Image (cartoon, rainbow, N blue to C red):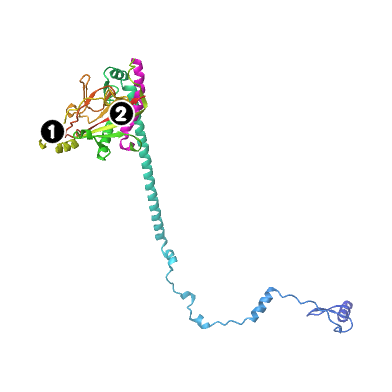
Amino acid sequence: MMIPTLLLAACTATNVEGFAYSPLSLRPIVAGGPEATSTSIHMGKRKPSMKERRRQRAKKLPSATVDRGILNELPSVDTWEKTDASVGSKRESIPTSEVAEEDNAAITDEETSIDKETEETIAKASSLVQAQRKSVDCLTHVRKRVEESFPINEAAKGLAEKGYFVYDGFLSKAVDADSENEDAVFGDEMVSEMLSETSSMLANDKMQRDITRIADGEFVAQIVGGENYVLCPRITEYVVSITRHLPPLLNKEYDVIGAGDLPKLDSAASMGSLRLYDRKTKLGTLSFLANPEDAASDDSVSERPFGVVCGDSDGTENDSRRLTAMLYLSSKEWDSSNGGGLTMETDGQKVEAIRDRLVLLRSDTCSYRQEPWLGSDDSGLDQASCAIVHFIQG
């Protein structure tokens, strides 16, 4: 067992061509001497690592010295005093409960504003829907009155024989004996609204003084619809509906009764107007034009002449109006003592201006006289009006 050990020691101590092991390095040995007398061949230098280069650079930098006096003057960490928060961080110092209350208040104000806007929008939409329904109901009511309750045969005969026809309760007359008829109640309310619309137009300067009758206290206005619909919606709907539905029925009835001389009417166009009487205006005008003793007297109003709607009965070729419908709008207490109405020249018939009375007369041939309005100082009797529709030749 000793032979291998000695042999290994001998091999390591003998100079042979090859590599000799040294604890410090490995280098090639050339045979011929203990340290190789010929040029030695060394291995290339190893490249230092990044960590080693950092260490070398650190050794070259001057060492930093710390002034311990400064550190000694600083208070210890557990004795630092709190300072005021900066402006940007002050909200963070507010208690959480107060922040929550502010946020909730802001949310509540915003929700309240939204709720108000929503309520206003809903109210406007509801009002618009109700107005549209009311308009449709009024148009329908007039149509039903013309088609279902108006005596079209009697009207055609009256126009053919006398040149006029009078019908009471056109909008508010009960269809049957029941005075609480729903249509009659609706029609009576419609008449009241129409009268109220004329008074409102006068109060808002939407009517013009009739200067041809300056002392009579009368005003006039045209019914044109469109943008002016809001001034008198019920009156406008009455004009539109009666224009659409009355002429076709009359034209048909003219053929039935053989009234060939009666002109056919247009159901697509008409001329609408209003005439309103205001007692206060009349008395005020008379106080300037008449003696003070006669200022409150109605006897100062002169009698008016007879005539036709188209003017001179011999010169109607250029006027297309052929039938005129007058619907009187007044209070339920209005009677003959309050004046107004018409007097027919042919038979001397007097037609009083009572509430919801419809008068049809031939515009080109029927001669009549409009009687002056009188009224009284009693409530509801100081104003009255008339909605006039002129049907034109078709």
Quarter of the picture holding the N terminus? bottom right
> Is residue 181 magenta-colored?
no
- How many labels were placed on the picture? 2
Q: Secondary structure at mark 2?
A: strand
Mark 2 highlights which residue?
389
38 vs 313, nearest the viewer: 313
Q: Residue at x 65, y 78 (%)?
A: 57
Residue 75 at what x, y percent from top left?
47, 78
Q: Residue 40: where, in percent of width, then height?
A: 84, 81
**Whole-Å distance between the Cαs marked 2 and 1?**
32 Å
Which is the main secondary structure of the residues drawn in magenta? helix
Quarter in which the C terminus is drawn: top left
**Residue furthest to the left:** 293
Please say if 253 is above or below 63: above
Asked if residue 244 is among those painted magenta in the image, a careful observer would answer yes
Residue 297's label in the rendered image is 1
Disc sitting over residue 144 in the figure: none
Task: Tell which of 72 and 339 is nearer to you.
Answer: 339
| Magenta residues (range) | 229-257
Residue 314 sits in quarter: top left
Residue type, numbered disc 1: Ser
Front residue of 349 and 236 = 349
As helix, strand or loop, the secondary structure at mark 1 comes to: loop
The amino acid on which the numbered mark 2 sits, given as a three-letter code, is Val
**Considering depth in this image, is 58 or 199 the residue closer to the camera?**
199
Which badge, 2 or 1, is on the more N-terminal residue? 1
- The image quarter containing residue 50 is bottom right
Residue 172 position, x and y percent, is 28, 27
Q: Position of residue 48 (x, y in %)?
A: 72, 75
Categorize mark 1 by other alpha carbons within 10 Å: few (<14), some (14-19), many (20+).
some
Viewed as shown, does residue 51 lie left or right of 93?
A: right
When asked about the image quadrant of residue 208, the answer is top left
